[in-house]
Image: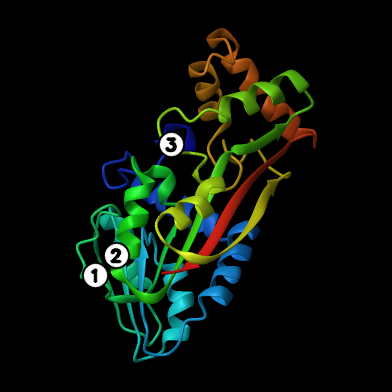
Amino acid sequence: MSTDDLPSGYQQVDSSADPDALLEAMEVTAAWPATVDLRSWERDRLALAGGERLLDVGCGLGEAARALAVDLGATGEVLGLDTSTAMLARARTDWDVECPAHFALGDAMALGVPSGSFDAARAERVLQWLPDPRSALTELARVLRAGGRVSLIDTDWGSLRLDIGDEALTSAVQRTMAVERHRPSRVGRRLADLAEAAGFRDVETTQATQVWSDWDPDRSPAPDGCFSMRDLADDMVEAGELDAADLEGFVAAAQDAARNGRFTMSLTMHAVVGTR
């Protein structure tokens, strides 16, 4: 199954046509240089200590929690919550650190854990899929003890830039991504404001940009870990920035640019850490 056939989101992984393909995409995005940089920054700022408890909301495959759990040690604890049983199963299988961990189904806007029961909490690329990110931040604040730390990493899809040698198409992509239609896709740029509104203080921010310049369209319909050019074209048609009759032409132009070394795409992710 190609990436073209996959849903453009992670709200319903288990009921998708090919959950394994989505899990593979999660592994790829975890290896993006931008993701690696932001997680390293997160680890430095959270400064987890032995014996502390960490909550990972939208834990996915659990690889970020595994890295942080090294700092918690054998006396610490991790709780990973996700809406996908497939992802939770992989997280349990791959857990290989001495810190105890529990993975369970959970709702970011109704965590179902006692107030003040965690020393730190994180949510990575979760808020962009939620109908009400503010409620999720309120929940994260509730479950943290006084002085607990929160880390948020998320994408600003409005920052997407595509250069295939056609200025008109570049501008059309920018206009398409500038509007949030079905979800808070630009929430990355609002993380600091959301954290402060939820009562977090000493909020620090950073950002990192992922760049694709070596996509091989004959090997994959999409740049590594990203959506396909056909998915992007569908969004442009829906936004009124591309005629439906021109959809195949857009896809072909992007593929041709990639084959001839003229394809560049970039996307900026943001991160914040704050204290309750």
Label 1 with label 2: CB-CB less than 8 Å: yes
Residue indicated by mark 2: 142
Q: Label 3: how many residues lie within 10 Å, few (<14), some (14-19) or many (20+)?
A: some
User: On the rendered structure, is 35 left or right of 27?
Assistant: right
Q: Nearer the viewer, residue 74 or 30?
A: 74
Q: Left or right of 153: which side holds 148?
A: left
The one nearer the camera, 116 or 121, is 116
Q: Position of residue 213 (x, y in %)?
A: 73, 44
Amino acid bearing label 2: Arg
3 or 2: tag closer to the N-terminus? 3
Q: Which residue in the protein does label 1 denote?
A: 115
Q: CA distance from mark 3 to mark 1?
A: 34 Å
Disc 3 to disc 2, C-alpha distance? 31 Å
Going by the numbered disc 3, the residue's amino acid type is Ser
Residue, x 55% and y 69% (percent of image)?
42
Disc number lying in front (3 or 1) = 1
The picture quadrant where one finds residue 221 is top right
